[in-house]
Amino acid sequence: MTHEMILYRTMSVCPKCCILDKKGLVWTNAVVKQSHHTVHLVIGCTLHGSFTLEYSANADHFKRALIHSLPRSPTESLHGFIGDIENIQQAKKAIQLSTSSKNLPSMIELSVFDGEQPVSDDDLRQQIILLTSSFPPSRQFVLKVKGELAADMELLNEKVLFVERTAPTQPAPLLLDVSFERLMLLIRLPDSCLLNRRIYPCIKYYIPKGMESEVEGEINSALEELEQEITGIQVMIDICVERPFPVLTNIIANLREKSSMVRVVNISMERPPREIIANVALNPAPVQGTVDISELLTNIEEDTRKDIVVEEFFPTTMLITLEPLLSLMGWGKYMLRPSPSYGFATVLLNTDTLRSVPISRLMDVDKFYESIASLLPQLSANQADIGILLGTKLRKILKTCARPGQPDLFTVFANDQEATFLSRSQVWIVHREIDFGALDLQYVVRPCVLTKLARQLWKSFSATDADSASASSASASSAPAN
């Protein structure tokens, strides 16, 4: 007897129509369903029939992400967020750009070069104004500045400093996304933007299986050189992998040892275009490909020799619980509300007695989420000041969620002698990139909506009458992606 259950209805794109027939993003009905312990995305197409991909081989882990989704109202069940999307109009309404959206991203990308050509200061200023106006008052976001193919390092440096001066002045960080080679050229400029403590380098590495030792050496050399050039510099490491997964044992261990310098480690999984095309065109199997992130989490568990296990990664939707804590600590007011299927995260804590320990060993993360969910509307309504009453409630929740024999995190945060506790903590995020062979409109597309819409809106605002027709044509061709 086959046990199947539809988890939710959504919309997707038939990979054969999109890739082989080159029709672009033509939305069609789809369902995400559970069969025994596996979750599948099933896409329906009137021309090619159904198309099935493996979403997750760990149904319990997948459903944990869905259950821990932000309720739409204080009275709504935590389980009630999983709804059906019946048509494209309703789907677009659910992800429309507005200051009341519960899905505004915590990070926005901004390119200062278009290919090899610099973006004008006026264009950059207007894009920043547009992005900032999309957030509720007093809310902050991380701005990821992309250098793209910049060849003139002095000009790139000027553009990054201009963005830093123009972007909101709250203590919101800027990530600088450039290659390591460009980074080392930038860092040696006398007025280097990297001397600004608000700007953090983001270094990306692609690690294919079999090349682990070479990339390990590159990462270690890069961190050593950066540390020699600027004392106390902090960075984000972005690692991209694909199947078959590389063995990350040494790389993970080295990054955990560098916790005071490497503050965020992002591991993303993607299917290369060749694999997507091969699955669409040639794979006759009932399940045509996989986008399962649980396999990557299992590999990380094995690579750390179970020092970090799969269950210690919590759904990134639960990062919303950090919003009031960051505000309470004076670190800023951010919207940490990624899509339920975005991925999983953990925070590794360091003290004089603990070395790189997942936060879930000190605190019941699931209990904390459920306890604080009812307070989130009040906390959002009191963005300017959490206040004594709400602060007291938060402290009580932290105490009740502490693991037996462990101190509550509020006490640790408030203790000046434990300042290094925070400065040595690391955030690890594991997620999959958006896959055009497995689009899920309800849960996957939303994290990138704001950036795409901002680019389109600003292009339409800045277009002249002479080229407005071509601008409209370009906007129309890309509109389905939003």
Image: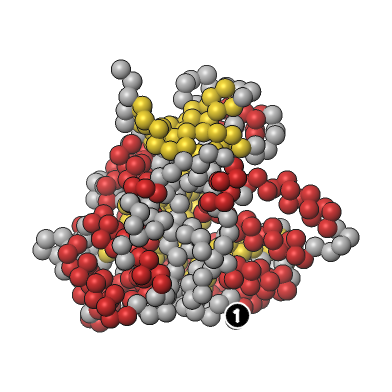
Label 1 sits on a secondary structure element that is: helix
For the N terminus, the quadrant is: top left
Which of the two residues, 78 or 349, is positioned nearer the viewer here? 78
Picture layout, residue 473 above or below residue 380: above
Using the rendered image of the protein, determine whether residue 128 is visible from the camera's viewpoint: no
Extreme-left residue of the structure? 405
> Which residue is located at x 36 percent, y 41 percent?
62
Where is residue 135 drawn, in percent x and y? 54, 68
State left or right for residue 132 relative to residue 236: right
> Which residue is located at x 60 percent, y 45 percent?
89
> Which residue is located at x 51 percent, y 41 percent?
85
- Numbered label tally: 1
Which of the two residues, 231 or 244, is positioned nearer the viewer here? 244
Extreme-front residue of the structure? 75
Which of the two residues, 225 or 34, is positioned nearer the viewer here? 34
> Which residue is located at x 55 percent, y 73 percent?
187
Q: Which residue is mark 1?
A: 165
Where is residue 117 drawn, in percent x and y? 74, 63
State left or right for residue 291 relative to residue 458: left
Picture layout, residue 274 above or below residue 147: above
Q: How many neighbours does mark 1 have within 10 angstroms: few (below 14), some (14-19), or many (20 or more)?
A: few
Please name the amino acid that badge 1 sits on.
Arg
Where is residue 296 drawn, in percent x and y? 38, 42
Q: Quadrant of residue 393?
A: bottom left
